[in-house]
Image (cartoon, helix red, strand yellow):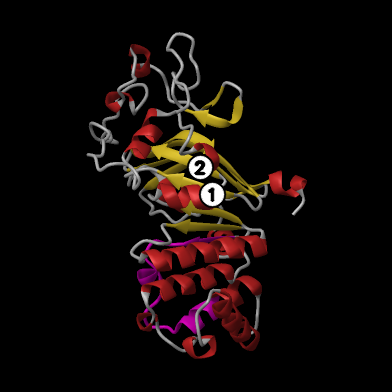
Amino acid sequence: MRQGQRSQPILEIAGLRVAFDDVPMLRGIDLTLARGESLGMVGESGCGKSVTWLAALGLLTRRARITGSVRLAGEELLHASASRLDKVRGGRIAMIFQDPASALNPVHTVGDQIIEALRLHRGMDRHTALAEARRLLDQVGVPDAARRLKAYPHEFSGGQSQRVMIAMALAGEPDVLIADEPTTALDVTIQAQILELLRQIQRETGMALVLISHDLGIIGEMCERILVLYAGHIVEDLPAHRLFDQPVHPYTRGLLAALPDLEAPRRRLPAIPGVVPNAAELPPGCLFAPRCDLRIERCGEWVTELAPLRGEARHRAACLRAVGDSSAGEIVPA
């Protein structure tokens, strides 16, 4: 893929806000995704990683009030018609959910489910779709694909079910694949196989990949760029190679400090003090300030905004001290 094509954004999200019964869950998410890029999203449960994409694809309940903009190759998706979203979901944007066993329909064979996706998004007749479904199962490493097409989801192991979900996601030849905790509940060996499969497919197809995970090691290995979320905000946006060596936001540093070092002597792992703020009773200013040991008085008044580090346009943080505020004193990257 040429460099000019590689840098073109395929998807742009601007000012995305989500509230449930007037309780805010996302508070202004801004991100761009280039063609072929691999983007990681990390943060505590409930920080908004999955909600960002469920909102973008119109998969939230009617209780959700959604504002902002989600543009795919220049086309606005937010509040698009149901018929248009049906074409986009599973077609141009595909999503692999956390639990493949519950995402697959238990009363239909996996072959019928893949064929349905192929006929919907690529307009194939059943005979052609059957051959393509077999090819997809072969591609994702399901053995004896012709026979397994006739099997039901309960006949597959966890790792095989995840491979089936990946095959279904690839059926529409998506521009963007969102993998939401794709290795949850899988053993380490199967995790490695699934991640290598995703990496291989991305190389072959040139699709953009969004990987949502709590595992910083997986994110650092798989992704080029990483977004760290906290309480519905992006608090740090940085290249993957800087995650472990040069994080600047105190929250990101807290997450990394809690990782065990297998080569160092055994020690008690430090924890971030306090708890995530109640979404219905948010503190003023920076939402992480009540838990931050570097906070200053201005943190309680400052609205959280991402800003580039001095001399590092591709590394942004939402912290007065991280971005070198003259009155706050700069945090030097670790």
Quadrant of res 117: bottom right
The kind of residue on which mark 1 rests is: Cys
Q: Look at the image and say whether residue 105 sits in the magenta stretch.
A: yes
- The magenta segment: 93-116
Residue occupied by mark 1: 223
Q: Nearer the viewer, residue 317 or 263?
A: 263
| Cα–Cα gap, marks 1 and 2 | 7 Å
Count of numbered circles on the image? 2
Query: Which residue is at a point 65% across and 80% down the rendered structure image?
Result: 124
- Horizontal side of 187 relative to 77 (left or right) equals left
Q: Is residue 56 visible?
A: no
Residue 78 on the magenta segment = no
**Amino acid type, residue under disc 2 in the picture:** Ile
| 3 left or right of 199 in image | right
Residue at x-position 33% and y-position 38%: 22
Residue drawn at x 43%, y 61% as measured from the top left? 182
Cβ atoms under marks 1 and 2 closer than 8 Å? yes
Please state which of residues 161 and 88 is positioned toward the viewer in this rendering: 161
- The quarter holding residue 274 reads top left
Q: Check disc 1: other Cα within 10 Å, few if <14, some if 14-19, many if 20+.
A: many
Where residue 39 appears, x then y in whole percent?
A: 54, 48
Residue located beneath label 2 in the image: 226
The image shows residue 75, relative to residue 305, as above or below, that is below
SS state under label 2? strand
Image quadrant assignment for residue 105: bottom left
Give the answer, above or below, for where 212 lies relative to 168: above
Q: Nearer the viewer, residue 51 or 79?
A: 51
Q: Residue at x 57, y 21 (%)?
A: 310
